[in-house]
Image (tube, helix red, strand yellow):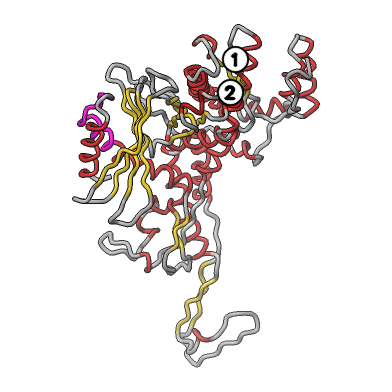
């Protein structure tokens, strides 16, 4: 969105949403800040995804380029460039891109939400608690279930934070008309919103409280008919506006508005920081600190590829031998000349480079330390684990990743429980499931990220049964579906 879009959108929002109380300059600054952040956020996504972009074949013969190539020095990406003007058609040296960021983030997500979580209600009434748990399970399942949580975790790991927006899928009357809380729970949706589409307006008194929240989405269209949809959520109202056109032909339509019935008095958004950052709305992501090391690793791998290319083949310098460039060099080939000063000198051939190998190994170790994810997390065993039992040795080797996961479960758990409170608030204000605010507290039971054998799981379940844990809950933890009234 350009400046003219922002100014006209601000004017239209102020005229259409006078009851919201958003100051035009405040909203203009909010949208301008969002536009300025999108480029850096797109860079984080590019380094994680490392997408392939087709292009004209270069001297290397590869008709594509990768996003992480932007971090290579010019001597590698285009040594023929003059004055800093890069011409891809000129090609370059051997380029090696090894994306060490993506698999590390994948391992982090597997440890965090690789298995289903269990939501346990803190309501005092046991029957109400079981109903609340079933309602929350229904809502999350219809919102995408474990896949939705993994998508939210992926966005949080890349950008540093992610928001969970709670909305009713149908209109307010449709939600209120439901008599069964489970059927009503199917109409409530939890949607992850990444920072590339979100523009939060923070309270000047408390950085943890939202005064408003805007979701910005660009719709496809030609250059003359660009469309942008802005959805604004406030403690009292939800508004949807469409901005279309460019230049002087900008038109703005108010597509709809409705009162906030999910959580009157609060913005229906649960904010999640990947790693907590004090006094700042956005948390710390995993991609940004790895980018410099990733660039250095790709540079050294490319340098090694060029060295191998030059040294792994024998080359010959011939003097005074006519037609040498046309004669193959190999066993049984006889070359003759009348030139007494003729000579053939061989050079090249692969040679060890210990310092180069050591430098690459140290870069990989640095990536391990910064991310907390060793190759062992993905099943790559490169060292002995000692004389400990397999489980203890594995936990000691992965101690950094396990501790990092435990810390993230605090921030992600806080966001998920907030979303659960918003879900129950929506059903309460719709008159479907009446709950006291104290009954909306939820506790999360996280699964062990390390895989246990079935025999170990059964022994643990038997120990829990001796302590009085209900059989239905134990069977659920073991992965067996049970009817609510069928097992006690």
Query: From what the image shows, is residue 317 above or below residue 209?
Result: below
Q: Earlier in the sequence, mark 2 or mark 1?
A: 1
- Report the side of 349 relative to 130 (left or right): left
Q: Quadrant of the N terminus?
A: top left
Residue drawn where x is 40% and y is 19% of the image: 264
> Residue 305's mark?
none
Query: Could you classify mark 1 by the number of other residues whose Cα lies within 10 Å: few (under 14), some (14-19), or many (20 or more)?
Result: many
Q: Is residue 191 magenta-colored?
A: no
Quarter assignment of residue 262: top left
Q: Position of residue 57 (x, y in %)?
A: 44, 68
Magenta span of residues: 20-33
Q: Position of residue 387 (x, y in %)?
A: 73, 28
* Foreground of the two, 142 or 415: 142
Tag 2–tag 1 contact (CB < 8 Å):
yes
Quote the CA–CA distance across marks 2 and 1: 9 Å
Query: From what the image shows, is residue 326 above or below residue 485?
Result: below
Q: Position of residue 468 (x, y in %)?
A: 75, 9
Residue drawn where x is 54% and y is 30% of the image: 187
Quarter assignment of residue 399: top right
Residue drawn where x is 41% and y is 28% of the image: 283
Judging from the image, what secondary structure is the residue with disc 1 in?
A: strand
* Foreground of the two, 433 or 368: 433
Prevalent SS, magenta region: helix
Q: Evaluate whether residue 254 shows in this view.
A: yes
Q: Is residue 31 magenta-colored?
A: yes
Q: Position of residue 46 (x, y in %)?
A: 43, 47
- As drawn, the residue found furthest toward the bottom would be 338
To which residue does mark 2 refer? 136
Residue drawn where x is 62% and y is 13% of the image: 129
> Residue 121's mark?
1
Judging from the image, what secondary structure is the residue with disc 2 in?
A: helix
């Amino acid at each position: 969105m350009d400046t003219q879009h922002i100014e006209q959108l601000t004017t239209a929002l102020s005229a259409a949403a006078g009851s919201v109380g958003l100051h035009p300059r405040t909203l203009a600054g909010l949208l301008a800040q969002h536009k300025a952040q999108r480029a850096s956020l797109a860079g984080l996504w590019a380094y994680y995804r490392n997408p392939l972009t087709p292009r004209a074949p270069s001297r290397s013969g590869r008709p594509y380029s990768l996003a992480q190539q932007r971090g290579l020095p010019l001597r590698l990406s285009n040594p023929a460039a003059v004055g800093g003007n890069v011409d891809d058609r000129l090609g370059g040296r051997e380029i090696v891109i090894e994306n060490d960021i993506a698999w590390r983030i994948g391992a982090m997500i597997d440890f965090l939400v690789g298995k289903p979580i269990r939501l346990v209600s803190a309501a005092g009434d046991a029957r109400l608690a079981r109903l609340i748990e079933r309602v929350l399970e229904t809502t999350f399942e219809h919102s995408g279930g474990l896949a939705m949580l993994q998508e939210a975790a992926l966005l949080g790991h890349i950008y540093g934070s992610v928001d969970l927006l709670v909305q009713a899928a149908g209109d307010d009357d449709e939600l209120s008309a439901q008599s069964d809380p489970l059927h009503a729970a199917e109409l409530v949706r939890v949607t992850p919103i990444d920072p590339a589409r979100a523009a939060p307006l923070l309270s000047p008194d408390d950085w943890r409280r939202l005064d408003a929240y805007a979701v910005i989405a660009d719709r496809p269209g030609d250059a003359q008919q660009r469309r942008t949809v802005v959805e604004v959520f406030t403690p009292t109202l939800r508004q949807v506006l469409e901005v279309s056109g460019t230049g002087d032909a900008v038109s703005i339509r108010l597509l709809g508005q409705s009162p906030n019935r999910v959580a009157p008095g609060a913005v229906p958004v649960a904010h999640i920081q990947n790693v907590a950052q004090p006094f700042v709305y956005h948390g710390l992501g995993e991609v940004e600190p790895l980018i410099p090391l990733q660039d250095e690793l790709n540079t050294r791998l490319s340098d090694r590829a060029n060295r191998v290319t030059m040294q792994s083949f024998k080359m010959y310098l011939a003097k005074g031998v006519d037609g040498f460039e046309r004669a193959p060099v190999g066993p049984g080939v006889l070359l003759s000349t009348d030139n007494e000063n003729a000579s053939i000198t061989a050079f090249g051939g692969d040679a060890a480079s210990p310092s180069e190998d050591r430098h690459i190994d140290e870069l990989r170790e640095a990536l391990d330390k910064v991310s907390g994810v060793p190759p062992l997390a993905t099943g790559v065993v490169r060292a002995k684990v000692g004389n400990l039992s397999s489980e203890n040795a594995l936990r000691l080797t992965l101690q950094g990743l396990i501790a990092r996961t435990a810390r993230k479960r605090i921030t992600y758990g806080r966001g998920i429980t907030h979303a659960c409170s918003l879900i129950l608030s929506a059903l309460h204000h719709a008159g479907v499931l009446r709950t006291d605010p104290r009954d909306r507290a939820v506790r999360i039971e996280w699964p062990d990220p390390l895989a246990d054998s079935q025999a170990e799981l059964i022994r643990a379940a038997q120990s829990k049964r001796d302590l009085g844990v209900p059989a239905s809950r134990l069977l659920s933890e073991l992965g067996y579906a049970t009817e609510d009234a069928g097992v006690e």
